[in-house]
């Protein structure tokens, strides 16, 4: 199973640089998600990897083969890849079995009977056994999607590409299919590139996530890395919700925002520089005001808004003596009403300084 | 050439002077005032288009207050038009002039014609006059063979109607259609008299091109599209020859079908005075001479002289067909032609 | 519901006058004899060997025209819609030009090009090779098939191109990434999905060929064979056999209705267009070294439809003798002088044509605008039926409509024969469907929400019509006007039966001149007709702001 290396890829559409000097490395057998808002270049990157687009600069290597460069592109039919499209792209004039069997026709050395056996087996794997002679028009959205998956997997591609395959499903089905795709990936272990704009989907499915912004990789890492150690404001705000506190470093481990002082651990700040801190809402500890509640990063505040979300309550708390408003996600109990006085505490370790790249 | 032109011009001038002045050349027509009030005459004619337009212009020059509305189409179509308009109670046409004498027998019987004898027509030969006075022969032509001089040397050209059956002319000949043209209907009937229907059956084996109007064969031959025309009015061929086109006319010795083209005024004519004025005009020696000179037509007028390079009627063996027979066998002519030639 | 009633009564009256009356008379006359109803006319019509031959010829013609139109139209559509063939805009423009060229003008031009002896191409061939026999003989069935096909293939082109635009590109990409090369993709994915459109286009081309009069009259009659349309026309010659003509027309009507029904069913299988999810982008297929040969092939085809015929018409207009080479002493303006000043019928005919075209277009556009608005916004009960009736005339071939109109309006109480009104009725009936299709598309593109937004804010329906709907619908209705206008200018098959000497129109005059062999005048009038047509097309493009071919479905 080869890995994929993207080196300095660039692709422009008119004046707009859709992909701008993008570099990325995929380990063999990993599932890497390309995550970002619309227009960030993730689909363009995917299509460059598939060979539908020619890069203006840069190279794409799969294993030890250079598949794309500004001067030469191996056509899609010879890249030994498979792709699952957002629309599934099932051929309406062919049965499910014919759809799935299609790619096997172009693989040398597979006999007809062998082909049929593989198709049947793959349909069983995606839990569509018995659907061989149906037509795509007769299937539900979820079933169509599974046919698309079967069609891609049966040819044993070196690289699997997925272009927002779940975005047309309803919410419940989407969740179910996330786990399904993850399961299939663990079963077959194909190097997979997965494009999505949905960050919870990326976090569930992938081994690593590459967050794209304006045609470049903003940060690549595991979900945990990105969540707990975002390097830029963009990444911090894109992955999960966060509070961003702007201030000035007063020492190597403290940041001042107006009258407030926040301790940051570990340190390593440059005193006098402007620093932005990311504080995840669920890491803000709330408690009722108790006399003597003092300590590092402990503040008093008033509840401005409280939204009951079932398993959490989403609070907006105005910090006393400051213009700072922090969001906190706390357990349903104890419950603080709007206007109540509360005490917030943020551990120094959860205040993550963000880099300049924004 | 120049002499003829001068004669022609003098005739026209004479006509002009006859009106613009106080009538030296001829007495003013008694229909003139009525015609002026009516303002126009509607003429359905099968005379070939440039000729028809020329006659109309001559008339309008002579009588500036009376316009001629020329509607030119094939004889059979004219009859179709007239009958369709009759059925719809449309009274549009004043003067009908076709080349199918049978039409006039039919129209007279249906009481659709007005009795009118144009001035000066008493001297015309019998074949140009209806004994009851409803219609008179305005012009005449004969059907002749024509061939393209560039493609066919004179020695090899067909000389008789029978020569046309020779297989070497296969795919090289053109015929007009009796379903459109009265000239051709007359031709077909005359040759049926001469050689029977088998003649046309054999002729059809040569895969002729079919055109409609009686002057189309000559234009087809002169353009070189086909090299021999098996029928057609000799007058249109003569006009083309005079213009310098590579076309020559053959008058077979077996006989040439004579086609006298009658004219008549309709009983319901909306402009009766103009119609009479126009009819008289077309029978004057001047206009008849114009028709002979520049159109190559034959006429019934005894004082008309003909060009030297055209055979006189008296020099030709003429095949005539009676109008009654033409009328009676019209359906048969068209039907059998289509049967042999396909369309 | 009083609004409904007004619209219904109006529509019903209009449709009765336009369609039911003529067709009713047609049906009635075909079975009426001197002693009550009879099938004698049908028997006479179908046992007559000449008519049987005409029927057979028509079937052969229509079938081959369908095939050749597909053979030309489908590849052209694929090349312009899916590949990187150069000058795509030019090719589309030429296809459009072919679409609006009246076929009888093309037929006529091809006589000048490929008449076996005097045709310019044959003369060239003979001078180059020294051969005796001609290269091409246009006065044959293959010749007729060719000439008709080069002007009907745009129907196939439009169907296929529009369908290709609907097929999401990712269906082809999915095949490609699974290992299929370009040809395999075209064969296994694109072609099967385009098949309904191909079949539909085939049927449309067949229908056109069935209804044509001018081209067969110009090319088949000299070769000695008839088609159904020319046969019906010749049955009108004196003495007219109108009952037989009626009997002969009815099967043509039935055949057309059947074919249209099949075509509708084929198009109804829209499930083929795209299944599931959102559509994708278009991926252009790179032809590589085949780019320029492909363009050359397209241009060769279009030269047969456009360059050669238009060229020869121009030559004919300016030459004294069209068959002779274009030399200094062959050049002349005499044809123009003759056509416009000496030939009495021309001016009247041009005036008649323009009058009728403008009148029909104005009234027709107003009618279809009203009817399609009412249908689209579902303002009346049974709006589907209204839509169906408005489109019904498409089923009636022009010559059959003319027979019906002739029968209906040459007898009391409405004797319209001999006036321009009978021609007006024929044109309105014939062109309404095409205008309606355009108007329908226009109103479909204006979402009802836009009007509802106005109503919620308090504007009355009339004000909304004036301030919201009309400005948005304007360009589409102008386009409908133009389509009707163009259709009227070139109409021949109905006009040829309904005209009288004082109500001639341009197409009839051109046809008349053909029977006189006046090639120069025909060329001049032909150029005038083409000029009018293209000026109107330019108007449509300006109004719609986009390609006409894309707009017509």
Image: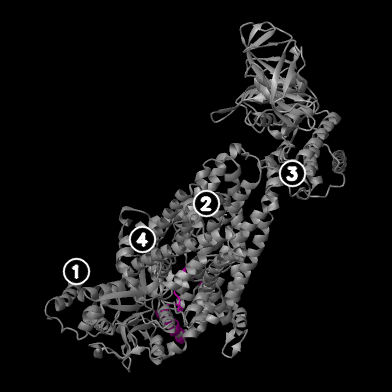
* Crowd class of label 4 (few under 14; some 14 to 19; many from 20; radius 10 Å): some
**Does residue A144 appear in this view?**
yes
- Which residue lies under the disc numbered 4? C321
Badge 2 element: loop
Please identify, in this view, whether the residue under mark 1 or under mark 4 is nearer the observer: 4
- Please name whichever residue, C46 or C248, is drawn nearer the observer in this view of the structure: C248
Give the residue furthest to the front. A291
Badge 4 element: loop
Q: Quadrant of residue B213?
A: bottom left
Is residue C119 within the magenta segment?
A: no
Please identify, in this view, whether the residue under mark 3 or under mark 4 is nearer the observer: 3
**How far apart are the two marked residues, 1 and 4, measured between alpha carbons?**
26 Å
Give the residue furthest to the bottom. B132
Are the residues flagged by discs 2 and 1 in contact, CB closer than 8 Å? no
- Which residue lies under the disc numbered 2? C458
- Which residue lies under the disc numbered 3? A90
**How far apart are the two marked residues, 2 and 4, measured between alpha carbons?**
71 Å
**How far apart are the two marked residues, 3 and 1, measured between alpha carbons?**
88 Å
Q: Along the horizontal axis of the image, is C504 left or right of C406? A: left
Please identify, in this view, whether the residue under mark 2 or under mark 3 is nearer the observer: 2
Report the span colored magenta: B167-193
Q: Along the horizontal axis of the image, is C527 left or right of C403? A: left
Q: In which quarter of the image is residue C206?
A: bottom right
Disc 3 and disc 4 on one polypeptide chain:
no
- Which residue lies under the disc numbered 1? B2
Are the residues flagged by discs 1 and 4 in contact, CB closer than 8 Å? no
- Please name whichever residue, C376 or A126, is drawn nearer the observer in this view of the structure: C376
Is residue B183 within the magenta segment?
A: yes
**Does residue C72 appear in this view?**
no
């Amino acid at each position: 199973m080869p890995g994929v290396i993207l080196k300095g890829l660039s692709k422009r559409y008119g004046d707009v640089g859709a992909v701008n000097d993008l570099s990325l490395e995929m380990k063999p057998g990993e599932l890497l998600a390309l995550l970002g808002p619309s227009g960030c270049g993730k689909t363009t990157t995917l299509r460059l990897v598939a060979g539908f687009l020619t890069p203006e600069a840069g190279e794409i290597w799969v294993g030890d083969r250079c598949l794309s460069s500004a001067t030469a592109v191996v056509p899609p039919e010879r890249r030994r890849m498979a792709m699952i499209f957002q629309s599934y792209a099932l051929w309406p004039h062919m049965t499910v079995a014919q759809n799935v069997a299609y790619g096997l026709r172009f693989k040398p050395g597979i006999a007809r009977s062998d082909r049929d056996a593989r198709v049947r087996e793959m349909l069983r794997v995606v839990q569509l056994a018995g659907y061989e002679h149906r037509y795509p028009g007769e299937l539900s959205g979820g079933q169509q999607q599974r046919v698309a998956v079967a069609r891609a997997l049966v040819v044993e591609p070196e690289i699997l590409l997925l272009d927002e395959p779940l975005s047309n499903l309803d919410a419940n089905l989407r969740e179910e299919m996330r786990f399904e795709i993850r399961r299939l990936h663990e079963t077959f272990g194909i190097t997979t590139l997965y494009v999505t704009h949905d960050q919870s989907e990326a976090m569930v499915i992938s081994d690593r996530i590459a967050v794209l912004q304006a045609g470049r990789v903003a940060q690549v890492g595991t979900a945990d890395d990105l969540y707990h150690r975002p390097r830029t404001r963009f990444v911090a705000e894109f992955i999960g919700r966060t509070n961003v506190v702007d201030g000035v470093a007063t020492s190597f481990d403290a940041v001042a925002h107006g009258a407030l002082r926040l301790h940051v651990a570990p340190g390593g700040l440059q005193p006098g520089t402007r620093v932005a801190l990311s504080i995840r809402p669920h890491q803000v500890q709330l408690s009722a005001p108790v006399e003597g509640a003092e300590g590092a990063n402990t503040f008093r505040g008033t509840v401005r808004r409280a939204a009951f979300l079932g398993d959490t309550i989403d609070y907006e708390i105005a910090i006393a003596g400051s213009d700072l408003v922090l969001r906190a996600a706390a357990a349903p109990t104890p419950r603080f009403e709007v206007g109540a006085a509360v005490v917030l505490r943020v551990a120094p370790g959860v205040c993550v300084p963000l880099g300049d790249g924004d | 050439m120049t002499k003829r032109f001068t004669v022609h011009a003098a005739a026209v001038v004479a006509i002009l002077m006859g009106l613009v002045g106080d009538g030296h050349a001829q007495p003013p027509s008694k229909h003139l005032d009525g015609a002026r009030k009516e303002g126009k005459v509607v003429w359905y004619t099968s005379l070939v288009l440039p000729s028809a337009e020329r006659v109309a212009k001559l008339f309008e020059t002579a009588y500036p207050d009376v316009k001629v509305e020329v509607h030119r189409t094939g004889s059979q179509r004219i009859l179709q038009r007239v009958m369709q308009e009759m059925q719809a109670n449309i009274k549009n046409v004043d003067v009908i002039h076709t080349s199918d004498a049978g039409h006039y027998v039919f129209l007279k019987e249906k009481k659709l014609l007005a009795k009118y004898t144009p001035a000066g027509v008493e001297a015309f030969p019998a074949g140009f006059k209806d004994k009851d006075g409803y219609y008179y022969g305005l012009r005449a032509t004969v059907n002749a063979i024509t061939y393209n001089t560039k493609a066919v040397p004179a020695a090899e050209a067909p000389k008789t109607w029978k020569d046309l059956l020779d297989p070497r002319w296969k795919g090289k000949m053109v015929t007009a259609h009796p379903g459109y043209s009265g000239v051709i209907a007359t031709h077909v009937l005359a040759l049926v008299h001469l050689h029977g229907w088998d003649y046309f059956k054999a002729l059809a084996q040569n895969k002729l091109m079919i055109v409609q109007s009686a002057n189309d064969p000559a234009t087809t031959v002169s353009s070189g599209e086909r090299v021999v025309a098996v029928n057609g009015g000799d007058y249109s061929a003569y006009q083309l020859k005079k213009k310098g086109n590579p076309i020559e006319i053959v008058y077979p010795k077996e006989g040439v079908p004579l086609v006298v083209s009658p004219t008549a005024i309709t009983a319901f004519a909306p402009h009766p005075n103009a119609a009479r004025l126009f009819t008289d005009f077309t029978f004057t020696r001047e206009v008849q001479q114009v028709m002979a000179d520049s159109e190559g037509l034959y006429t019934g007028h005894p004082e008309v002289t003909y060009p030297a390079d055209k055979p006189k009627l008296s020099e030709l063996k003429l095949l005539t067909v009676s109008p009654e027979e033409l009328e009676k066998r019209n359906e048969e002519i068209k039907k059998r032609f289509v049967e042999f030639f396909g369309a | 519901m009083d609004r409904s009633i007004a619209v219904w009564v109006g529509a019903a009256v209009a449709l009765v006058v336009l369609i039911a009356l003529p067709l009713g008379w047609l049906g009635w006359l075909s079975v009426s004899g001197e002693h009550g109803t009879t099938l004698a006319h049908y028997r006479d019509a179908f046992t007559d060997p000449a008519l049987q031959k005409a029927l057979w010829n028509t079937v052969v013609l229509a079938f081959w025209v369908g095939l050749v139109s597909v053979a030309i139209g489908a590849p052209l559509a694929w090349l312009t819609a899916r590949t990187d063939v150069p000058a795509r805009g030019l090719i589309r423009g030429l296809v459009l030009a072919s679409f609006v060229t009246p076929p009888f003008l093309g037929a006529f031009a091809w006589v000048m090009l490929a008449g076996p002896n005097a045709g310019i191409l044959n003369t060239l061939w003979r001078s180059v090779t020294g051969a005796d026999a001609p290269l091409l003989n246009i006065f044959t069935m293959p010749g007729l098939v060719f000439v008709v096909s080069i002007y009907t293939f745009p129907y196939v082109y439009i169907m296929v191109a529009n369908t290709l635009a609907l097929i999401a590109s990712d269906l082809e990409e999915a095949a490609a990434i699974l290992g299929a090369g370009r040809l395999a993709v075209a064969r296994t994915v694109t072609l099967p999905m385009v098949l309904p459109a191909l079949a539909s286009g085939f049927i449309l081309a067949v229908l056109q060929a069935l209804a044509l009069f001018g081209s067969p009259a110009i090319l088949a009659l000299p070769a000695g064979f008839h088609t159904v349309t020319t046969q019906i026309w010749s049955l009108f010659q004196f003495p007219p056999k109108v009952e037989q003509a009626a009997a002969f027309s009815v099967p043509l009507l039935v055949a057309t209705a059947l074919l249209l029904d099949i075509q509708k069913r084929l198009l109804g299988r829209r499930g083929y267009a795209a299944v599931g999810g959102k559509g994708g982008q278009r991926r252009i297929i790179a032809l590589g070294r085949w780019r320029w040969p492909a363009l050359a092939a397209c241009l060769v085809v279009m030269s047969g439809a456009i360059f050669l015929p238009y060229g020869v018409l121009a030559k004919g207009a300016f030459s004294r003798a069209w068959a002779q080479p274009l030399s200094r002493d062959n050049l002349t303006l005499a044809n123009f002088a003759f056509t416009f000043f000496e030939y009495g019928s021309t001016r009247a005919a041009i005036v008649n044509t323009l009058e009728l075209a403008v009148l029909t277009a104005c009234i027709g556009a107003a009618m279809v605008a009203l009817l399609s608005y009412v249908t689209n916004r579902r303002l009346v009960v049974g709006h589907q039926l209204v839509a169906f009736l408005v489109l019904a005339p498409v089923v009636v071939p022009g010559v059959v409509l003319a027979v019906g109109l002739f029968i209906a309006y040459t007898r009391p109480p409405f004797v319209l024969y001999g006036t321009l009104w009978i021609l007006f009725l024929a044109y309105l009936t014939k062109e309404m469907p095409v205008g309606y299709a355009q108007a329908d598309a226009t109103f479909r593109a204006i979402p009802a929400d836009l009007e509802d937004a106005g109503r919620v804010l308090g504007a009355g329906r009339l004000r909304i019509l004036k301030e919201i709907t009309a400005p948005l619908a304007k360009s589409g209705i102008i386009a409908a006007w133009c389509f009707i206008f163009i259709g009227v200018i070139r109409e021949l098959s109905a006009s040829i039966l309904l005209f009288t000497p004082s109500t001639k129109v341009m197409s009839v005059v051109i046809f008349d001149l053909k029977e006189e062999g006046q090639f120069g005048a025909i060329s001049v009038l032909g150029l005038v007709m083409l000029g009018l047509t293209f000026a109107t097309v330019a108007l449509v493009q300006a109004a719609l702001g986009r390609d006409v071919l894309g707009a017509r479905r």
